[in-house]
Image: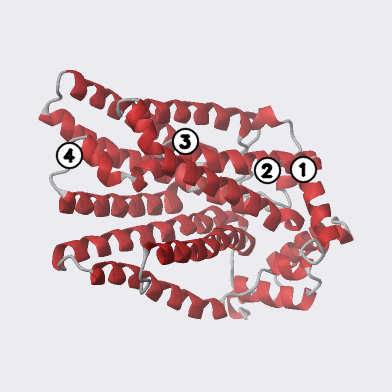
Amino acid sequence: MFTPNVSGLYAARIISGLGIGALSVTGPMTIAELAPPEIRGLLTAWYSVMQMVALTSSTLTTYGIQLHMAPSRLQYQLALFVPCIFMFLLSIFSFWLPESPRWLMLAGAHDEAVTALLRLRRLPASHPRIQQEIQAIWETIESETELSRNGARSFAGIKAVAKETFTVRSNVYRLQQALILYVLPQLSGGNSVTNYFIPLTKILGIQHNPTHGIFLSGMYALSKLFFTLIASFILIDGLGRRGSLFLGTTMQMICNIYLAAYLKVEQDTGASHAASEAALAFIFINAFGYAVGLLTLPYCFGGELWPDNIRSFGAALAQTCHWLFHFGMTYGLPGLLAATDNWGAFVFFAAWCLIALVYVFFMVPEIANLSVEEMEKVFSRPMFTAYKAGGRKDEIQTLEGADLHDLS
């Protein structure tokens, strides 16, 4: 906020990027470890929901500053100060966040792990669900090597974790899933539309002035928040991971095809006002498809598919790939638009959506309602048979009678 030059701003952005990178790894991973299997998809999706809350807040803050403040240095300082309020509150609330029972048990703190699990589930230690979950976690921990358990504590341990990640067949399958499912959202154009929303609306001829462009950007962010809520509450666990990916990616592809055709016609002969209005509508429908599929699902997969002993290492690799491609597409989109007369960029996005559909059908297994321990069987299957495997519909143990009075 107070840097006197651009160099200071760049340095601050690099430092903040280190924190964002760490949070993008630990956020989905922690939620997946803390959540019960039957609502893990919903809770992990809320990582994306909160991303959309942040996007909406920041965009509407920028719109308010643009609308009500005269151009000055204070405009930029206020826009940079507002996120600090959220970060301060999150730092305070983090002191009440329980540690992951899986991590505690992996570290040998069995009693603390049981205490954390009881706090999370709000059930007595004698409840069958608690006993089953503790037993399942413990059996997984016991199956790991001592060196892998201490992977974060020594260089030799890190080498062992890396070896297990890259040489065990089921873990290679997991790694492939995580990497590709983080790359596809970038290549499908979902983030590119968000990052370049104002220039793209100008290219499409649906922006009247810069302030109107910021307003549309705020409405776009708000729509993504609403659509992500729909995905988290209804679709991810209702349709399953595969079904949500199919629905969302198909809608994205259709929208990209229309936008490409609209831009081509607009350049050649001129498009009607109705076609222009439809282009704006398709941008928002694109947001729905992205929110339902390739925005939310990679975080679900990236957080929940790893075994405990390589979870942090695998999630870090996946997020590294995610941010590299995010940077690449953000940096490369202006050149892509210029080289393809604008409309070709949307053909590029549509083609990658089609590739994503084929990939999901053959390669992405359904892991809805599966415990972390049960996923080992899924990822031990041949890679190209994902369409033959289905998630398990668990009978969820409910709290009845005396259990309700025994809650701790």
Q: CA distance from mark 1 to mark 3?
A: 25 Å
Q: Amino acid at mark 2?
A: Leu
Few, some or many residues within 10 Å of mark 1 (<14, 14–19, 20+): some
Q: Secondary structure at mark 2?
A: helix
Q: Nearer the viewer, residue 19 or 309?
A: 19
How many C-alpha atoms fall within 10 Å of the one at disc 2: few (<14), some, or many (≥20)?
many
Quadrant occupied by the C terminus: bottom right
Q: In the rendered image, which residue does mark 3 sit on?
A: 187
Q: Classify 298 as above or below 94.
A: above
Residues at discs 2 and 1 in contact (Cβ within 8 Å) = yes
Q: What residue would you read off at disc 1? A: 166
Which residue is disc 4 drawn over? 206
Q: Is residue 252 above or below residue 133?
A: above
Q: Is residue 384 left or right of residue 301?
A: right
For label 2, the residue is 175
User: Distance from label 3 to label 4 (Cα)?
Assistant: 24 Å
Q: Residue at x 54, y 40 (%)?
A: 183
- Check contact, mark 3 vs mark 2: CB within 8 A: no
Q: Nearer the viewer, residue 302 or 150?
A: 150
Q: Is residue 244 visible?
A: no
- Assess disc 4: are there few (<14), some (14-19) or many (≥20) residues with their C-alpha within 10 Å of its C-alpha: some
Q: Amino acid at mark 3?
A: Leu
Q: CA distance from mark 2 to mark 1?
A: 8 Å
